[in-house]
Amino acid sequence: MSVVQEQPASTPHPRGAVAVEVEQVSRVFAGRSGDVHALQGVDLTVAAGEFVSLIGPSGCGKSTLLRLVADLDEPTAGTVRVFGRSAREARLARDYGIAFQQAGLLPWRTVRANVELPLALSGTGRAGRRERADELLALVGLSDFADHHPDQLSGGMQQRVAIARALAVSPSLLLMDEPFGALDEMTREHLQAQLLRICAETRAAVVFVTHSIPEAVFLSDRVVVMSPRPGRIREVVPVTLDRSGAATPAVGPTDDAGDDLRNDAAFVASVAAVREALHGGSATGRGVDVR
Ligand SMILES: Nc1ncnc2c1ncn2[C@@H]1O[C@H](COP(=O)(O)OP(=O)(O)OP(=O)(O)O)[C@@H](O)[C@H]1O
């Protein structure tokens, strides 16, 4: 996992207002039976502090796009910039935190030591690391497992550790690929609310891949709807919701404010708009596995 330099949480990134700029990006993979056009001519700009979800049918290139932003892969054509830098420079400058589908934890380190790792790399002292790691483990509900090793945890718990680790140094940009995919519904909704709160506090920009329309709408300022392969942006659905209630810390074990938001007419309308964008209008919408 990449990690980020510690920056004052409330200060905008020094490189200006654009977190991610993807211009005319294509990615072609050499497959056994010919080229696979995963992405074609994709343009996307994510502002600093903006939450953008990518949604679309399986294989439409969502993860590929995220991996290009993270410099885990290179575009066949086009450019990717992160806070004004190339994706490579941004990775080396540790401009972002990553939480991907596979937790990618280090098996020989305890849960706490995994969360502390990015803090150690950014030079945080021992006491500070421990305090921050314990705070994040409490946030994801894993305080009792700090001294366990990853293989003693369920898949969903491992994912929560990876999320805590991605948040460790309050990144200006979070890249998340179905981070809540393996979680039960209650934990998932709880972590969605926590993520909103964290983003409100840190003003981090987020690029978030999901298969869940309600999840995308709950979290996002804009939902980017992609078309089946070759992945292109079919439509960008703006979401305007008052999330101030949902982003405040829950007092009990449930996130009632999040429930209120999900019952809001504006939420229901946005879910319908994204669903329409995904399924509407063309035969290519068939076979979409998005919930
Ligand atoms: N390294 C690779 N080599 C060859 N083909 C690849 C590679 N990575 C991705 N692909 C292909 O590119 C296409 C897009 O894959 P990608 O994983 O980005 O889709 P996705 O939208 O994230 O899918 P899902 O929702 O199922 O996770 C798929 O057809 C996939 O098989």
Image: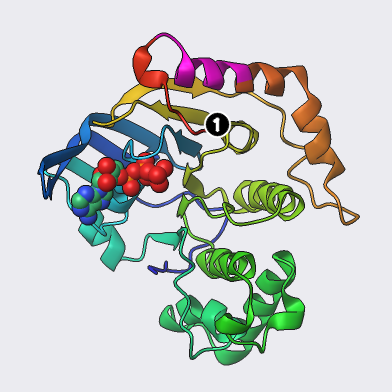
Q: Residues within 10 Å of mark 1 (few under 14, many from 20)?
A: some
Residue 261: x and y, percent? 77, 31
Q: Amino acid at mark 1?
A: Asp
Camera-side residue of 65 and 121: 65
For the residue with label 1, is its CB less than 8 Å from the closest atom of ligand 1?
A: no
Which corner quadrant of the image does residue 26 belong to? top left
Q: Is residue 274 magenta?
A: yes
| Magenta stretch in the rendered image | 272-281
Residue 61 sits above or below residue 187 on the image = above
Query: Mark 1 — residue?
Result: 221
Camera-side residue of 52 and 154: 154
Q: Is residue 86 magenta?
A: no
Residue 164: x and y, percent? 59, 67
Residue 264: x and y, percent? 78, 23
Residue 209: x and y, percent? 46, 44
Camera-side residue of 217 and 242: 217
Under circle 1, the secondary element is loop
Camera-side residue of 66 and 94: 66
